[in-house]
Amino acid sequence: MSCNLVPALACHNLHFSWGPKATLEAVEFNLPPGSLVGLLGPNGAGKTTLISLIAGLIQPANGHVHLQGQDVRILGPKARSQLGFVFQSVSLDRFMRVRDNLHFAAGLQGLSRHASEQRLEALTTVFPIADLLNRTVAGLSGGQQRLVDIARALMHNPAVLILDEPTNALDVPSSQAVWNTLKALQFDSGLTILVATHRMDEAGSCDQVVFLNQGRVHWQGTPQEALDQMPNPELTSTRAVNLTDWFLWTLDQRQTP
Ligand SMILES: Nc1ncnc2c1ncn2[C@@H]1O[C@H](COP(=O)(O)OP(=O)(O)OP(=O)(O)O)[C@@H](O)[C@H]1O
């Protein structure tokens, strides 16, 4: 993964405030093409706000989001066609069948019914949802709904997928199914993925992690580089350091007095 490639997505000097206090300040980071990047940070760090901003649901007071080197504001609707979003709440109509939800989402993105059928067929080779297509969303488990929701975000075949805590409240097998699917998408189709997560096991299997705290990006690098930052020899002598140790250590370094 070369750093010389134009990033699939880059945030430059983003500023945003919900109120008098800054929520995001000078946020800078980038997603190398084809990478899986974990967005980490404590509750209230600004992860969801940042994702809403990239999605265009809110506008930055300052700064730019670039998609493959081009400003999303200039790209306009073209940018939307290159981005897929999975928000914290599942974005499906509970009373519609899975199949109809997916075709509806594709239609909103301008796909013909024929193109939508073809796309759905392709996605069912990666997503274990073929048996769910004729069921209504309300009758599915949380894990099944989440998989369908991710498929929904990919119906228009975006280049970049952004997910906000997709495994939140899922049990271990369901989380694993979601994570395996993300990995397969990255591996099979070169999808670039940004995923906000509180799970350090997931962060550890990302190519890079971005650490956001109090609205600022404090660190971006590989999970191994994160662990290599840890200065505590006592901890390393008794057991292997893990990303949870790093998270707590780096958070401690970043607290404002
Ligand atoms: N719609 C809103 N109106 C006002 N303030 C908001 C709104 N959404 C978020 N905030 C505030 O912005 C800050 C960042 O919240 P945000 O939800 O982006 O953090 P987060 O890192 O996603 O947190 P979590 O890990 O708990 O999901 C918090 O102080 C929050 O209270």
Image (spheres, rainbow, N blue to C red):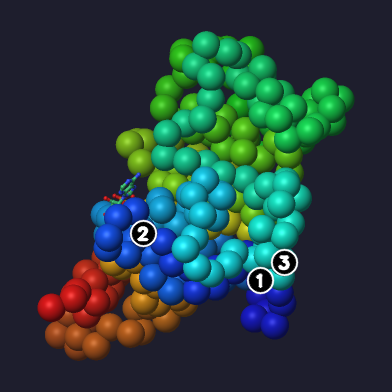
Residue assigned mark 2: 17
Separation of residues labelled 2 and 1 (CA atoms): 26 Å
Cα separation, mark 3 vs mark 2, equals: 24 Å
Residue 70, label in figure: 3
Q: Is the residue 232 above or below the residue 98 in the image?
A: below
Q: What x and y, as percent, mark residue 22? A: 32, 65
Query: Residue type at mark 1?
Result: Pro
Relative to 8, say whether 147 is above or below. Answer: above
Question: Mark 3, mark 1: which one is toward the viewer?
Answer: 3
Residue shown at 39%/70% (left/top)? Answer: 25
How dense is the environment of label 3, judged by Cα within 10 Å: few (below 14), some, or many (20 and up)? some
Whether label 2 touches label 1, CB < 8 Å: no
| Quadrant showing the C terminus | bottom left
Q: Earlier in the sequence, mark 3 or mark 2?
A: 2
Q: Position of residue 123 (x, y in %)?
A: 71, 36
State which mark lies toward you, 3 or 2: 2
Judge whether 168 appears above or below 199 on screen: above
